Image (tube, helix red, strand yellow):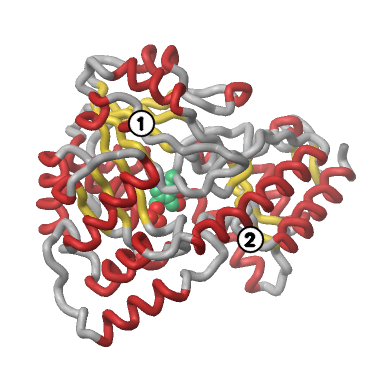
Amino acid sequence: MSILSQRAQALQPSATMAVSARAKELKSQGVDVISFGAGEPDFDTPEHIKQAAKNALDAGETKYSLPVNGKPELREAIVEKFKRDNNLEYSPSQVCVSYGGKCCLYLAFQTIVDPGDEVIIQTPYWVSYPEQVKQAGGVPVFVETEEKNDFKLTPELLERAITDKTKVLVLNSPSNPGGFTYTFEELKGLAEVIADKDIIVFSDEMYDRLVYDGTKCTSIAATMPEMMEKTLTFNAMSKTFAMTGWRLGYVAGPENIINAMTKLQSQAASAPAGFIQTAATVGLKGDQQCVEDMRSEFQRRAKRMYERLNEIPGLSCIKPTGAFYCFPNISGWFGRELAGKKITGSLDFCATLLDEAHVAIVPGVAFGCDSNARLSFATSMENIENGLNRIEEFLKKYA
Ligand SMILES: Cc1ncc(COP(=O)(O)O)c(C=O)c1O
């Protein structure tokens, strides 16, 4: 009998981590690797937020932080944020603060999903959804989307995936890795399918402020009044404020669900550190110019990376409207040879690119979409130019 629980044995390591580990290994051997693997902003946390944390530490915010769902000032600031940016009216009692968006999602799956419940997840998806569903005993039901439709779930596809076991629909807009953003009309179309069903939407809006060229990010909970009762809206300080390492996320939704998640958090971890919550409050309530500065730089990079990718033989890419990823189709190389290796899928393609051109990109198979690969533009313009030069020069040899 294994010492490990069946749950622990069933868990898959994050495939995105595997690529960065291999890139790190090469770097440690002295190889000059350019990495497009990053899932976090390359900017530092804005100074006034860091200063707020330092001040809070000096003021003695070093004890257990109460209440478990987050400090009232922070939950107030989150309520204001949802109103200001997402047209959502929550009250502070409908908000729970936790350790990054990831932990908010984890608490939610544990709170909502029973063994055998089905959770609808579209491809391409963020890597942790299926594993978190399985940890709760649920069954991920993958819905394949079409690249020609910008990888978007449609009402027809959703309708077909729903069974009497469906408990949750996961939506992520702007999308990691797809880089697409649902419009109000598209989300309303999906909302109409589930409006009369006992299905909860987990709306992952981590990248809501990182949208480009006039794209608007809509929350599905704002598309029709019924959706407020049927949606958990997830967000975090991580991507918007370049605070990935601070581990501060939040979720809002029906009070009974939030209370159940809070109870779980009280037994598993207690509330995130008080000085971090204070800094997050300052971030949400303070001058938002820092967010705009980062957003506009991401927009510049998105355009450049998208244009360059479409010039490279065998690659094609839809233009990212949000998040910080391009997700080119690489399947033009499948069945062919690169550096003497037959390419059969995204894993081979990315491994060959890393070993031969010293560029790290993430195989789409990690996101349930083998025909593509993910490149993060959360890196300098210089890295983008140099890395894409390398990819182009390498692939041109075999075109
Ligand atoms: C779509 C998506 N959801 C959730 C998360 C988790 O965010 P956090 O770092 O706040 O836990 C990420 C981070 O990569 C993400 O891309």
Look at 81% across and 41% down and name the residue there.
Answer: 312
Q: Is mark 1 within 8 Å of ligand 1?
A: no
| Mark number displayed over residue 15 | none
x, y percentage for residue 74? 24, 61
> Circle 2 sits on which residue?
379
Going 75% across and 36% down the picture, which residue do you hit? 315
Mark number for residue 220? 1
Q: Quadrant of the C terminus?
A: top right
**Label 2 element class:** loop
Q: Nearer the viewer, mark 2 or mark 1?
A: 1
Q: Residues within 10 Å of mark 2 (few under 14, many from 20)?
A: many
Q: Mark 1, residues whose alpha carbon is within 10 Å: few (<14), some, or many (≥20)?
A: many
Residue 128 shows up from this direction: yes
Q: Is residue 344 visible?
A: no
What amino acid is labelled 1 in the image? Ile
Q: Position of residue 42 (x, y in %)?
A: 57, 64
